[in-house]
Image (cartoon, rainbow, N blue to C red):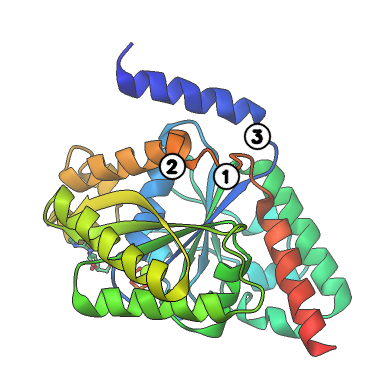
Amino acid sequence: MDQAERLRNIVKQQNIQRQLARVITVTSGKGGVGKSNVSVNLAIQLSRMDKKVVIVDADFGLANVEVMLGIRPKYNLADVMFHQKSISEVICQGPENIGFISGGSGLREMTNLGRDQITGLVSHMSDLDRQADVIIIDTGAGIADNVIELVTYSEEVLLVATPEPTSITDAYALLKTLCRHLDFNSDRTCIRMIGNRIQSYEEGKELFDKLNTVINRFLNMDMEYLGAIPYDENIPKAVMNQKPVSMAYPDSPSARAFLELAMVLETGEQFQAYPSRGRGLAGLLARLFRADRTKNN
Ligand SMILES: Nc1ncnc2c1ncn2[C@@H]1O[C@H](COP(=O)(O)OP(=O)(O)OP(=O)(O)O)[C@@H](O)[C@H]1O
Ligand SMILES: [Mg+2]
């Protein structure tokens, strides 16, 4: 049995033990640094490890993920909230068995929901939590209020950054805003950085060390390093063909890096401090709404 097979077996064992979905929120300070590619390719790689993965697109502006997957969802989360659609009707079947839910205008309208609608939505999400092993939320970039709110109440966050100076300063700005949020708790939210468009392993690690040193010193917070994705011409080519690079070019350097990241996410010993059992998307939304109600009252 080779190493990859051994790791896959560990993951399969964990699948049996898990009850609620693990929710992973993918974000960044600066836009265009690779969040949607990370979301989609991690989803594909985790699905190949027998995980039932659903991507939720919480980026309201552009229909990024659906274009990348070459699918056209008929419904979105707003239809669950306002048009009595069930979660199964709104999940769109993507390639390689991954599910996809378009946020549509739904997530933005959440602040205007009444009590019954909130209860309905959270209970729909409980259904999703039981169906999925992993829910990946692809967010828009940056300091937008709704992104900060989602990240604040998430348990696992992947922060994507590239070595460009603006990406680093914007990542710092995002973390600073997060730290100032009254409900942010670094014991509850685990932030892991992914370096993207990296030229070498060292460059990825340097990027992480630089950012982590600054947030240690000035924000008194800590994050972990998940790993890096190299700069790879196959990614834009794959995007053009509306196929994730892990499918279009499975042996490319970036597809191999995505496989490694997915494996570290699932088996990484350095993450043992955090429970591998998820608390689900319903839990995240319930925390979000609770905070919102407290603020409004
Ligand atoms: N490792 C990489 N190597 C080469 N090009 C890449 C890499 N990662 C992403 N890209 C390119 O960068 C662009 C932005 O990627 P992507 O759409 O995933 O970013 P994003 O953070 O989701 O953007 P947005 O903030 O607009 O949602 C795409 O055109 C993609 O092809
Ligand atoms: Mg995107």
Q: Name the residue under label 3.
A: 18
- Give the residue at the far bottom of this rendering: 296
Q: Position of residue 180 (x, y in %)?
A: 56, 81
- SS category of the residue bearing label 1: loop
Category of crowding for the residue at label 3, using alpha-carbon neighbours closer than 10 angstroms: few (below 14), some (14–19), many (at least 20):
some
Q: Is residue 227 visible?
A: yes
Question: Which residue, given by chain and number where applicable, does mark 2 sit on?
Answer: 265
Q: Nearer the viewer, residue 144 or 185?
A: 185
Q: Give the CA separation, mark 3 to mark 1.
A: 14 Å
Based on the displayed image, in which of its 4 quarters is residue 155 positioned? Answer: bottom right
Residue located at (49% from left, 84% from top) = 144
Whole-percent x and y of residue 91?
A: 60, 55
Q: Specify which label sits upstream in the sequence, 3 or 2.
A: 3
* Amino acid residing under circle 1: Tyr
Instruction: State yes or no: discs 3 and 2 in contact (Cβ < 8 Å).
Output: no
Q: Relative to 293, is 170 on the left or the right?
A: left
Circle 1 or circle 2, nearest the eye: 1
Across and down, in percent, residue 228 comes to 26, 51
> Label 2: few (<14), some or many (≥20) within 10 Å?
some
51 with respect to 170 (left or right): right
Asked if residue 140 shows in the view, the reply is: no
Kindly identify which numbered label has been placed on residue 274: 1
Question: Which comes before the other along the chain, label 3 or label 1?
Answer: 3
What residue is at 57 percent from the left and 28 percent from the top?
A: 14
Mark 2 is on which residue type?
Leu
**Ligand 2 quadrant in view:** bottom left
Name the mark nearer the viewer: 3 or 1.
1
